[in-house]
Image (cartoon, rainbow, N blue to C red):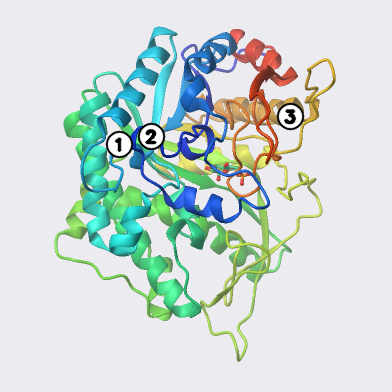
Amino acid sequence: MEKQFPENFLWGASSSAFQIEGGWEEDGKGKTVADFNSFKRSHIQADSKVASDFYHNWREDILLMKELGLKIYRFSIAWARIIPDGDGEVNLKGVEFYNQVIDCLLENDIMPFITLYHFDLPYALVEKYNGWESRECVYAFERYAKICFEAYGDRVKYWQVHNEQNLMVRVDERMNIYVDDAWEADRMRAQMDYHMFLAHALAVNACHSLVKDGKIGPAVSSTCTYPYSNKPEDVWAAKMNDWFKTNYCLDIHFTGEYPGYYMRYLKLRNIVPVMEEGDKELLKSAKMDYIALNYYRTLCARYLPVDEEHPEGSRVCRTNEVDFDQYGYFRDEKNINLLASEYGAQIDPMGLRIVLNEYYQRYRLPLIITENGLGTGDILTEDKKVHDDYRIAYLRDHIKACALAIEDGVELFGYSPWSVMDLLSSHQGFKKRYGFIYVDRDDHDLKQLERIRKDSFYWYKEVIETNGESI
Ligand code: BG6
């Protein structure tokens, strides 16, 4: 392949705290919403108590990252390790844990690329304030972010605020929305979303004032939706699906204003969030430096007409909370032109090229991919190998799409797939694996948690060594 990646391109790999760390209550860490939900499912699958046990293996794991050749390691800090109850005392042991991880990464020439909040709201904030529904949570987050910037900002220059706010607010268990009334759930969701936008803005501004040369941005769950047919209604539905599920979020980060189509929906549904004086100015003042995007799949949508039972704007979840349908807007459909993973994600490298071009043309900000990958069950052979050629094929095709997007003129400065090693899936326990490194455990049998390099590990190592030429 011709040389398409810039010299200083940031090849990386990613993880998140509750999915990799384990040690969930060690050294003072508080319980999080992610722990709570994983414990609820623990009769059927692994939970976050041990996960990949990075908390006890981080030195060895970082040496593996070095061997892989990573330029960046994208991971998250567990808010509840730093402040166990979310807004009370600081847990120095938690602060020290990440200090050691950061130092060890830097000693091994790996740049830490940190997310402040990846689905794991301290559970105490839910108990005290119902989490993001309250403004208290906004100020708690600002304080937590400042503590992180002050503790690590001398060494960490790249920060991400919320991981996938646009997806997180759609998943009720992440937000702790447990109400039967659909309208009330929508109202809470809209208010929580708004508070997260305020928290984002406060964190962006704090980073700029506390971290010398610090760069900060959001990590969004990205996708592109194709129309089910060329009927204008279906084209509109596809656009709406994208705008409602992703673009509204970036638009608000970018302009500081709710876009008209989104405000129209909030008004129609009578769920415009409570806003206070000064919020507008705050939202406008926070300027993100780059956009990180997590990309796995594309979607397909057709227009969903309203009926007597379902007024415009009401939503229904047929399969899961993430891909909800909305009356008067869109309904997600299967795209018969694409193959899907065993878990139903429609695989689409060209979609990534489209997304990169669209975001770059719309926002003109540097982009980085902080998640992309194939979640599937791997087979460990008797001689301890994992022949994951299917993962190599997935990643190769997506890296090629990145190269083409760069040729198209997109300013893409890094690629950090999911995940550095096998870790707890956000919903499917430990059998759904994404890593370059196999972690030998099952959902309920921890075994020795041995780390085994998969075929994709050696392949990606060469990709990094040759700056993408070997793919
Ligand atoms: C992203 C999340 O949405 O998708 C990760 O940021 C998650 O936390 C990843 O693990 C893959 O999803 P899943 O459900 O297969 O683990």
Residue 401: % across, % down: 65, 31
Residue linked to disc 1:
82
Q: Is residue 1 visible?
A: no
**Residues at marks 2 and 1 touching, judged by CB atoms closer than 8 Å:** yes
| Residue at disc 1, CB closer than 8 Å to ligand 1 | no
The image shows a total of numbered marks equal to 3
Quadrant position of residue 111: top left
Residue that sits furthest to the right in the current view: 382
Which residue is drawn at the image coordinates 45% and 66% (left, top)?
177
**Foreground: disc 2 or disc 3:** 2
Residue that sits furthest to the left in the current view: 277
Element under label 3? helix
Q: CA distance from mark 2 to mark 1?
A: 8 Å
Q: CA distance from mark 3 to mark 1?
A: 35 Å
Is the residue marked by circle 2 packed among few (<14), some (14-19), or many (20+) residues within 10 Å? many
Q: Is residue 20 left or right of residue 44?
A: left
Comes first in the chain, label 2 or label 1: 2
Q: Return the residue nearer the eye: 372 or 178.
A: 178
Measured along the vertical axis of the image, is residue 231 above or below residue 470? below
Which residue is drawn at the image coordinates 75% and 58% (left, top)?
334
Q: CA distance from mark 2 to mark 3?
A: 27 Å
Q: Which mark is residue 77?
A: 2
Q: Is residue 437 left or right of residue 119?
A: right
Element under label 1? helix
Residue linked to disc 3:
391
Q: Quadrant of ligand 1?
A: top right
Residue that sits furthest to the bottom in the current view: 308
Residue 199: % across, % down: 28, 50
Placement of the C terminus among the 4 image quadrants: top right
User: Given the image, on which type of amino acid does mark 1 rest?
Assistant: Ile
